[in-house]
Image: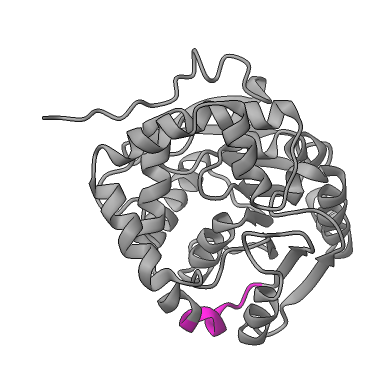
C-alpha cells in the first residue's frame, strides 16, 4: 500500500500567508522552493527552525526590510517547499540545497540569522565555505546534541520510516488548543494569528514528515566537535524563558568558538523573534551599523 503525504497548498493554506506579496517560487537544482524576498540594502538571510516556515518571520522580516534586502525560504520539505530526495533532510544535505538556492538567487548575504535548527544549517554552511557573511546570528540556536538523543534519534528515524506516523501526528495536531499547547511548551505565547499559522502546517502530514526527517537525520555530536573550525563571527542570542534549547547551551558553544558573543535576553521563550520582533530587529540593525555595513552598501 502506498501512503501519500498531504502537502500544504499555496492556494489553500497559503491563501493569506504573511507577506504573501513578497513570495515567489524558485527552482534550484530540481527542488522547488517557496522564498520571500523583500527590501533593499545589505543582505540578510533568515532561516526558520524545525517544524516552522516563513510565517515564523511574519513580523521580523518586514521590520528588517526597511534597512536590508531580506531573503527567507521555507526549508526543504517545510511549508510550501518541496520535499527533497536522498539525504536532503540531513544537516549536510540541507546546507548543500540552501547553497544551490542562494546561487540561483545570486544572493550573497552580509548577515545570516537562524532560529533554532536554522542556526545549525548556517553554521554548517559557513564551516564548508558555502557562505561568507559578516556574522552569524543564532536565535536560541539548536547547536548541541539534544539531551536524551541516544533514544530520541532512533525513535524519530523509526517514526519517519513509518508512513503512517506523520499522518497520525497530523491528526493529533488538529485543533487550536493542541497547537497552542505545543507552542507554550517551548516557553512562548503567540497571538491567535500565530497559533493559526502553525496549526495549518501541523495538519499536513507532508510537513510533519519533513520535521521528523530532520530530527532523524541530524548528527549534532559530530557537529559539536567541528565547532572550533568556525571563522565567521558568531552572535548567540538566548531567551530566559526558552524551554526548548537551554540558554546555558550558548556558553558551551561559546567555549568552542573563538570570539563568540552571547546576547542574553531577559524575556521571551524559544520563539522570541515572534514574540519580540522589534527587539530582535533592533539588535540586527545595531550590529550592521557597528560593522559599517550601511556605509559599504551605499558605495
Which residue shows up at 31% across the image and 41% down it? 165
Q: Answer left or right for 190 relative to 54.
A: right
Q: Answer left or right for 283 relative to 147.
A: right
Number of marks in the rendered image: 0
On screen, 128 above or below 106?
below
Q: Which residue is outermost to the left?
A: 1
Q: Most prominent secondary structure in the magenta stretch?
A: helix
The percent coordinates of residue 278 (x first, y second) are 86, 44
On screen, 253 above or below 52?
below
**Front in this rendered view, residue 218 or 157:** 157
- Any part of residue 42 in sight: no
Q: Which residues are magenta?
A: 225-232
Q: Answer left or right for 267 relative to 77.
A: right
Indicate the quadrant where residue 194 lies.
top right
The percent coordinates of residue 123 (x first, y second) are 55, 66
In the rendered image, residue 155 lying in the magenta stretch gets the answer no
Q: Answer left or right for 231 relative to 264.
A: left
The percent coordinates of residue 213 (x first, y second) are 35, 50
**Front in this rendered view, residue 273 or 32:** 273
On screen, 6 above or below 86?
above
Which residue shows up at 50% across the image and 27% down it? 174
In the rendered image, residue 230 lying in the magenta stretch gets the answer yes
Amino acid at each position: 500500500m502506498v501512503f501519500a503525504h498531504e502537502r500544504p497548498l499555496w492556494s489553500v493554506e497559503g491563501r493569506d500567508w504573511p507577506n504573501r506579496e513578497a513570495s515567489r517560487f524558485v527552482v534550484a537544482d530540481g527542488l522547488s522552493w517557496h522564498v520571500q524576498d523583500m527590501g533593499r540594502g545589505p543582505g540578510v538571510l533568515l532561516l526558520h527552525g524545525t517544524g516552522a516556515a516563513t510565517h515564523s518571520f511574519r513580523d521580523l522580516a518586514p521590520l528588517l526590510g526597511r534597512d536590508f534586502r531580506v531573503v527567507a525560504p521555507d526549508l526543504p520539505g517545510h511549508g510550501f517547499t518541496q520535499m527533497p530526495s536522498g539525504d536532503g533532510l540531513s544537516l549536510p544535505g540541507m546546507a548543500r540545497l540552501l547553497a544551490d538556492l542562494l546561487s540561483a538567487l545570486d544572493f550573497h548575504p552580509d548577515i545570516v540569522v537562524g532560529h533554532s535548527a536554522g542556526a545549525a544549517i548556517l553554521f554548517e554552511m559557513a564551516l564548508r565555505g558555502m557562505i561568507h557573511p559578516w556574522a552569524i546570528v543564532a536565535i536560541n540556536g539548536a547547536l548541541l546534541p539534544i539531551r536524551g538523543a541516544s533514544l530520541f534519534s532512533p525513535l524519530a528515524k523509526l517514526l519517519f520510516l513509518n508512513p503512517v506516523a506523520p499522518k497520525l501526528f497530523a491528526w493529533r495536531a488538529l485543533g487550536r488548543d493542541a497547537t497552542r499547547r505545543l507552542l507554550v511548551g517551548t516557553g512562548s505565547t503567540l497571538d491567535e494569528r500565530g497559533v493559526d499559522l502553525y496549526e495549518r502546517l501541523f495538519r499536513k502530514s507532508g510537513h510533519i514528515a519533513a520535521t521528523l526527517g530532520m530530527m532523524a537525520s541530524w548528527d549534532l555530536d559530530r557537529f559539536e566537535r567541528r565547532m572550533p573550525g568556525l571563522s565567521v563571527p558568531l552572535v548567540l542570542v538566548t531567551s530566559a524563558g526558552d524551554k526548548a534549547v537551554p540558554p546555558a547551551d550558548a556558553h558551551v558553544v561559546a567555549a568552542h568558538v573563538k570570539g563568540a558573543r552571547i546576547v542574553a535576553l531577559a524575556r521571551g521563550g524559544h520563539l522570541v523573534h515572534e514574540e519580540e520582533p522589534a527587539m530582535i530587529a533592533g539588535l540586527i540593525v545595531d550590529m550592521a551599523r557597528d560593522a559599517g555595513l550601511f556605509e559599504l552598501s551605499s558605495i
